[in-house]
Image: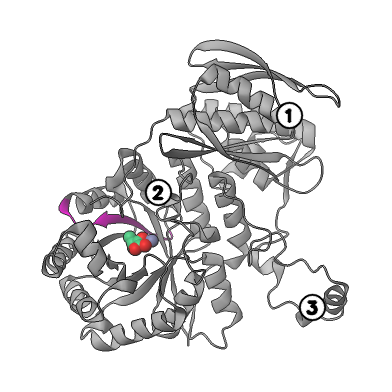
Amino acid sequence: MSDHLIIFDTTLRDGEQSPGASMTREEKTRIARQLERLRVDVIEAGFPASSNGDFEAVQDIARAIHDSTVCGLARANENDVRRAGEALKPAKSMRIHTFIASSPIHMQMKLRMTPEQVLEQAVKAVGWARRYTDNVEFSPEDAGRSEPDFLCRLLEATIAAGATTVNIPDTVGYTMPWQFGALIKSLRERVPNSDKAVWSVHCHNDLGVAVANSLAAVMNGARQVECTVNGLGERAGNASLEEIVMAVRTRKDVFPCATRIDTTQIVAASKLVSGITGFPVQPNKAIVGANAFAHESGIHQDGVLKHRETYEIMRAEDVGWGANKLVLGKLSGRNAFKTRLTELGIDLPSDDAVNVAFARFKELADKKGEVFDEDLHALVSEEGIVPAHEYYRLAALKVTSETGTVPHARVMMNVGDTEVVAEIDGDGPVDAVFKAIERMAGSNASLLLYSVNAITGGTDAQGEVTVRLERDGRIVNGNGADTDIIVASAKAYINALNRLHAKVVRLNPQLAA
Ligand code: KIV
Ligand code: ZN
């Protein structure tokens, strides 16, 4: 029988450390529910000491999730560990993940600590965590560039102190797969109590080898992989969950282990994460890219029609492609609508919120006829349903655009309790709308990114727009969806302004001392 490979998802923690990928509490819970449906073993829900918002989000997820272990990150200090322990209290199954840097460069330049001090602090942190749970994970940050002898001492001491999982991060994505595999093998052989803990890996993708490194580690005894949906994460991201899971499943002839993931939920998870964060998935991305199963060349098409396995090593339906069911139509009632939201893990906070969402659903169904799950996710992601950041609201919009004339926009919106109007010309209709909104909001934010995607197929599909704004070093994404892409653009811009207005201050665990 093959071993169990534990899938530890960190989309909500490391994934959220991507600039602009911050999510609201409600969005995080929605993603956590989808991760539970995907049957991930451990959900790293956040870093509770980083902000009150993160603490509450981890608490919400701890309450909502029953079939996965919920984990919170903590630096190796008593306050962080206490915050993680308190946030996770409602969880049916919890884990505290504590870490401290172990490479010479991080110890000297960032922590200004000696190796002995780091070792002592790590052992203490594991001890503090054990007061809350016997499920404790320890990570020596930047292990990929740490001295192997020191790593062995540190890991032996933390396992002896009660760490039940030891995680080896390649924090800066520096290691090559054969080196990383050899590192895991040698640590497992050299650490005397290595059999008392599960060995885990956490790889970043700076040189494009995060998945290869993780798989090399699995071949050398790692039995937990830390990964994210769509490979989201700091800088170039983390190892991608879908690629790890499908590699192990498709090549069961070479991997001595298996996951318990429900692979048919992969595409839904990918779309949800990309819709909420506004990070689109490149079309040629393995497993979840729009072209991952599309055969363009005649020779390939001919081969696949004659015998599918000539060119296909996996089946599109096994990862959830083609599963977007028609769920609701114009005639669906409030109850059917609410039931579908519940099935999707969308829990609106009040009857008023359900009413607002239902009114929007009716409007959309009138325009579009057919409403899919992706449309429902987009619909509840819009501001106004969960009224947390609703300082700016779109009231009305009129745009004129005709060949040979200058595009012109008239936008009416609410800023706090006041209704304001602005009219302005622009280089194009979207430019005119953004200028009008900016004139009223006066945010002085810079527009870093504007992108439009169709949520489902067909020309009647909703356009989903992502707008990324930056002000004083803070980056936020805003999303908006509508069958009219100019309206979707206005909603996305206003959504981003609301997020800037919300002034969420969060520590990055790896930058904070
Ligand atoms: O990349 C890293 O080292 C991390 C640790 C906190 C595990 O994210
Ligand atoms: Zn990381």
Asked whether, in this view, residue 319 is left or right of residue 305, the answer is left
Q: Which residue does the image show at 61% across and 52% down from the upper left?
A: 271
- Kind of residue at disc 3: Arg
- Kind of residue at disc 1: Gly
- Pointer 1 local density, CA inside 10 Å: few below 14, some 14–19, many at least 20: some
**Magenta residues (range):** 67-78
- Of residue 92 and residue 80, the one placed in the foreground of this image is 80
Q: CA distance from mark 1 to mark 3?
A: 46 Å
Asked whether, in this view, residue 382 is left or right of residue 47, the answer is right
Q: Which residue does the image show at 28% across and 89% down from the upper left?
A: 189
Q: CA distance from mark 3 to mark 2?
A: 41 Å
Please identify the quarter of the rendering in which residue 490 is found.
Answer: top right
- Of residue 92 and residue 193, the one placed in the foreground of this image is 193
Q: Which residue does the image show at 67% across and 28% down from the upper left?
A: 431
Question: Which of the labelled discs sits on residue 234, or is there none?
Answer: none
Q: Nearer the viewer, mark 3 or mark 2?
A: 3
Q: Circle 3 sits on which residue?
A: 308
- Pointer 3 local density, CA inside 10 Å: few below 14, some 14–19, many at least 20: some
Q: Earlier in the sequence, mark 1 or mark 2?
A: 2
Question: Which of the labelled discs sits on residue 61, or is there none?
Answer: 2
Disc 3 Cβ-to-ligand 2 distance below 8 Å: no
- Kind of residue at disc 2: Ile
Q: Position of residue 348 (x, y in %)?
A: 51, 36
Q: Can I make out residue 273 in this image?
A: yes
Q: Earlier in the sequence, mark 3 or mark 2?
A: 2
Q: Nearer the viewer, mark 1 or mark 2?
A: 1
Local SS, label 3 = helix
Question: Which of the labelled discs sits on residue 428, or is there none?
Answer: 1
